[in-house]
Image (cartoon, rainbow, N blue to C red):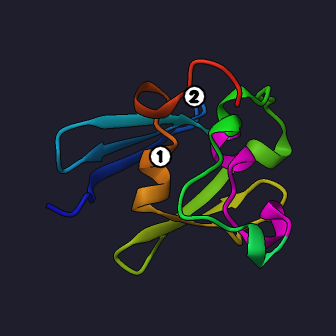
């Protein structure tokens, strides 16, 4: 079974994105983590650094709420991803389903930084 979301909710009160998957698991990602993990070439330091999943060290970066982490809009990108527009106008990152699931701290957070 291909992993796909059955529901995506942006909660601006808690600053979290909640994704319910077709395997009945729910992933909750703080907006600040989502922004820190932006998969676009600009944020990753070039196309050669872009990966299908975020670097596990992303879970250990201090998260700060700022204009950059204010979610403005989410839009579907084909049937495989979403694109997020942030408060500072940045909207280049395409977050695939695989990438979003890898941001699930409950499932993927390492015990300590690598």
**Whole-percent x and y of residue 85?**
67, 62
Task: Identify the residue at image location x=84%, y=37%.
Answer: 66
Residue 38 falls left or right of residue 15: right
Q: Please state which of residues 81 and 12 is positioned toward the viewer in this rendering.
A: 81
Image quadrant holding the C terminus, namely top right
Task: Identify the residue at image location x=62%, y=39%.
Answer: 56
Residue 42 falls left or right of residue 56: right
Judged from this view, the residue extending furthest toward the top is 111
Q: Earlier in the sequence, mark 2 or mark 1?
A: 2
Q: Is residue 82 above or below residue 105?
A: below
Q: Please state which of residues 33 and 86 is positioned toward the viewer in this rendering.
A: 33
Residue 38 among those drawn in magenta = yes
Image quadrant holding the N terminus, namely bottom left
Q: Please state which of residues 36 and 12 is positioned toward the viewer in this rendering.
A: 36
Residue 40 falls left or right of residue 16: right
Judged from this view, the residue extending furthest toward the left is 1
Q: Which residue is mark 2?
A: 13
Q: Which residues are magenta?
A: 32-45
**Whole-percent x and y of residue 59?**
65, 31
Q: Which residue is mark 1?
A: 102
Query: Mark 2 or 1, which is nearer the eye?
Result: 1
Residue 67 falls left or right of residue 86: right
- Tell me the SS state at disc 2: loop
State the CA–CA distance, disc 2 to disc 1. 24 Å
- Tell me the SS state at disc 1: helix
Task: Identify the residue at image location x=17%, y=45%.
Answer: 23
Judged from this view, the residue extending furthest toward the front is 114
């Amino acid at each position: 079974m291909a992993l796909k979301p059955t529901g995506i909710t942006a909660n601006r009160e808690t600053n979290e994105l909640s994704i319910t998957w077709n395997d009945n698991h729910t992933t909750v990602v703080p907006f600040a983590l989502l922004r820190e993990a932006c998969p676009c070439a600009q944020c990753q330091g070039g196309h050669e650094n872009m990966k299908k999943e975020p670097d596990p060290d992303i879970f250990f970066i201090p998260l700060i709420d700022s204009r950059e982490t204010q979610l403005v809009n989410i839009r579907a990108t084909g049937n495989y991803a979403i694109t997020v527009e942030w408060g500072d106008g940045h909207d280049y990152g395409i977050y695939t389903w695989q990438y979003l699931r890898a941001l699930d701290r409950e499932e993927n957070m390492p015990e300590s930084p690598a």
